[in-house]
Amino acid sequence: MEFVMVLPVYLATLGGIIWMGEKSLDAISLRSANHWSAFMAGNRFSVRTPATLGLTKLFPRATAVYDSTKRSLVDEHSYLQFIGSKVGILQSTPEILGNWINAPYTVVGENASSSIIPDITMTSSRYGNDYTMAIIMRSKGSSSAKRHWHSSLVADKDLWEFDGKEDSYPKKWELEILKDAKHTDDTKTFEDEPKKIDFYERYEEYKKWSVSK
C-alpha cells in the first residue's frame, strides 16, 4: 500500500526530470536555430528556406516551429542590411510522461482525459524580447551596386567615390531601427548596370600608360 501511494510521486519526479532535461536541450537548440534563421534571411547565394521547413528536424518533439524575422534597409538599394530574428516552438506533453500519466486509464482500457500539462511555447528569448539575434549582412541586390562593379568599370566611369544613398547607413546598428523599417526588401537591383569591359580592352588611361614612348 505504501508503494502504491508513493509510486505517483516517483513517476512525477522521474517524468519531471526527463521533461526538464528535454526543455534544456530545446533551449540550446533554439539558440542555434536563431542564428540559422537570421543568417538564412540574409543568404544571397541560395534559396532562403523558411524556418518552418528548415528547423523541423531540429525539434522532433515540437508540434510547430516558427520564427519572427525582420530586415531594415536605409535605402531600397542599400549595400548593407540589418536583420533581427527570434525563433519559437510549440510543444505538447512529452510522450513518455504522457504515457505515465495516462497509465491508470490505459490498464483498464479507458480513454485518457485531456493532458494535465498544457502545451508549452518556448522562444529563444528568456525575457520576451522581440529579437534575440541581430546581424549586418550584404543585401541580395548589392550584386549590381556600384561598389560591386568590375574594376574596369570603376576606372572607365571614373567612379572612385561611393557617396550615393545606397551607401548611407544608420548612426547606430540597434534593434530600434527594426520597429519602423522603411525598406524591407533587399532583392531590388540597379537596372542600369553597364556590361563589363573585356579584359584586354580596358580603359583609355591604361592604354596610354602601357604604350612605350
Image (cartoon, rainbow, N blue to C red):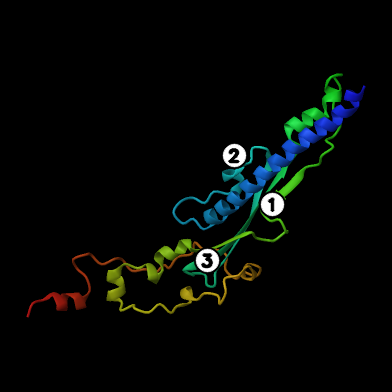
Q: Which mark is residue 57?
A: 2
Q: CA distance from mark 1 to mark 2?
A: 17 Å
The answer to whether mark 1 and mark 2 are in CB contact below 8 A is no
Under circle 1, the secondary element is strand
Judged left or right of residue 173, residue 79 is left
| Left or right relative to 210: residue 6 | right
Q: Which amino acid, mark 3?
A: Gln
Q: Earlier in the sequence, mark 3 or mark 2?
A: 2
Q: Nearer the viewer, mark 1 or mark 3?
A: 1
**Which quadrant of the view contains residue 86?**
bottom right
Q: Nearer the viewer, mark 3 or mark 2?
A: 2
Amino acid type at circle 2 is Lys
Q: Position of residue 24 (x, y in %)?
A: 68, 44
Q: Mark 1 highlights which residue?
A: 123
Circle 3: is it few (<14), some (14-19), or many (20+) Cα within 10 Å?
A: many
> What kind of residue is marked 1?
Thr
Q: How far is disc 3 from disc 2 in space, using C-alphas?
A: 29 Å
**Which element carries disc 3, helix, strand or loop?**
strand
